[in-house]
Amino acid sequence: MAPLTAPQAEQLKKQLQQQKAALWEDIRAELERSGNQKFADLAGEVRDPGEESVAAMLVDIDAAIVDRQVREIRDIEDALARIADGVYGACIDCGADIGVERLQAYPTALRCIRCQDQHEKTHGGEGNPTL
């Protein structure tokens, strides 16, 4: 695979910046919406344990959504830093070029497809909880 050209890197940089701005807007809107939606409003006036558990679950889901979006922003910032450092598009495991098609589909990719596949086989399985 050929390394990224300067125009390709610039196009991906713009894509990352747009994605980051959209995520910040989503976070702002989500926090604004959840700030207007108090736990007591979600639980309602009845306050039975079932309704409280649903309200708590909705609050947790909102927090999880924002947390996921913040992690995505961090990944984007890391990718933008790799662009600035001139190492964007190089696999962190083997150093090979990641590939333009993969970066266009997943601009925060850290690994080439071969290394990502190996990483998922090694680290992607569910843990085996023990007591």
Image: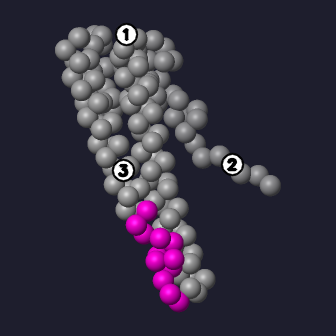
| Rendered view: 107 above or below 19 | above
Q: Quadrant of residue 37?
A: bottom left
- State the colouring used for the structure image: one colour
Label 3 element class: helix
Q: Earlier in the sequence, mark 3 or mark 2?
A: 3
- Residue at 45% x, 42% y: name it: 70
- Residue at 42% x, 63% y: name it: 34
Question: Quadrant location of the N terminus?
Answer: top left
Residue 25 horizontal side relative to residue 35, left or right = left
Label 1 element class: loop
Around disc 3, counting alpha carbons within 10 Å, would you say few (fewer than 14), some (14 to 19), or many (20 or more)? few
- Residue at 58% x, 35% y: name it: 123
User: Could you give the CA–CA distance between mark 3 and mark 2, rounded to whole angstroms?
Assistant: 37 Å
Residue 36 falls within the magenta-colored stretch: yes
The amino acid type, in three-letter code, at marker 1 is Gly
Which residue, given by chain and number where applicable, does mark 1 sit on?
A: 86
Which residue, given by chain and number where applicable, does mark 2 sit on?
A: 128
**In the image, which residues are magenta?**
35-46
Q: Earlier in the sequence, mark 2 or mark 1?
A: 1
* Identity of the residue furthest to the bottom in this view: 46
Q: Nearer the viewer, mark 3 or mark 1?
A: 3
- The percent position of residue 127, horizontal first and vertical second, equals 65, 46
- The percent position of residue 9, horizontal first and vertical second, equals 26, 17
- Which numbered marker is on residue 28? 3
Q: Nearer the viewer, mark 3 or mark 2?
A: 3
Residue 59 falls within the magenta-colored stretch: no
